[in-house]
Amino acid sequence: MIKGIVFDLDGVLVSTDELHYRAWKALAGRLGIPFDRAQNDRCRGISRMESLEIVLERSPKSYSPEEKAALAAEKNDNYRAMLAGLTPSDALEGAAETLAALRARGYRLALASSSKNAPLILERTGLGAYLDAVVDGSRVTRSKPDPEIFLTAARELGLEPGECAGVDDALAGVESARAAGLLAVGIGPSAAAGAGDYNISRLGELLPLFPGAEGEI
Ligand code: BG6
Ligand code: MG
């Protein structure tokens, strides 16, 4: 029986996946490297430094670890400048309503995001108010698809992994949730690939999947 639901953030609750794309695209443009949306989709769910490797894979020049750290910082500064303009209306359609409804049905809710910027995004959008536990990129040592982040989130909810569902737009995220033993729900690109145990196109579609105690939907 599912008692807890663990959400990814970027591309699930907030359209920050698009801001990541714009910030990486700006960096790639400055460096004269092509970067497209298919590459950006491969950056979903993985860490900032792993994403940078994908951005640089079409570069003829190789970069030292120090140069890579500076490039990642440049992208992050630009990305955070974009995040500064976020407001509650930037949460994805139905995000706040769906989280509120699931909580009202008694589900415990957590975040499992690879982003070190997750606290800022939760604060700007107000979505942090609906979460019982937050696990972000500063709390894990192994990136999705490793199960660490979903296992940590389930533990912080005080639940067994098998009592939780994980919702993620990234293939790496769906793989991470499943490897941790959660029921995997795909949304967006991971749903398009049919990667989840359930695949949805809008957050509101979670409500019939997770009814209340009396089957309320
Ligand atoms: C994930 C995104 O949520 O966070 C990835 O899907 C991103 O694309 C990762 O690389 C790390 O984000 P940040 O904000 O710490 O650079
Ligand atoms: Mg995501």
Image: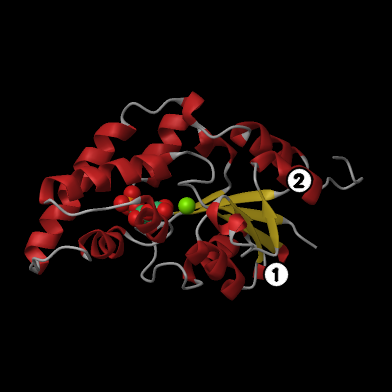
Task: Point out which mark residue 68 bears.
Answer: none
For label 2, the residue is: 106
**Residue under the point 61% across and 65% down:** 195
Circle 2 Cα neighbour tier, 10 Å, few/some/many (<14 / 14–19 / ≥20): few
Label 1: which secondary element: helix
**Residue under the point 65% across and 67% down:** 182
Question: Cβ–Cβ below 8 Å for labels 2 and 1?
Answer: no
Q: What residue type is labelled 1?
A: Gly
Q: Compared with residue 212, is residue 143 higher up or lower down, i.e. above or below? A: below
Q: Distance between the residues labelled 2 and 1?
A: 17 Å
144 displayed left or right of 85? right
User: Residue 104: image x %, image y %?
Assistant: 75, 38
153 displayed left or right of 32? right
User: Residue 102: image x %, image y %?
Assistant: 72, 42
**Residue under the point 45% across and 38% down:** 122
Of the 4 image quadrants, the one containing the N terminus is bottom right
User: Residue 119: image x %, image y %?
Assistant: 39, 43
Q: How is the protein colored in the picture?
A: secondary structure
For label 1, the residue is: 162
User: Residue 166: image x %, image y %?
Assistant: 61, 59
Foreground pick, 126 / 86? 86
Q: Which amino acid does label 2 sit on?
A: Gly
**Residue under the point 54% across and 64% down:** 150
60 displayed left or right of 217? left
Between discs 2 and 1, the one toward the N terminus: 2
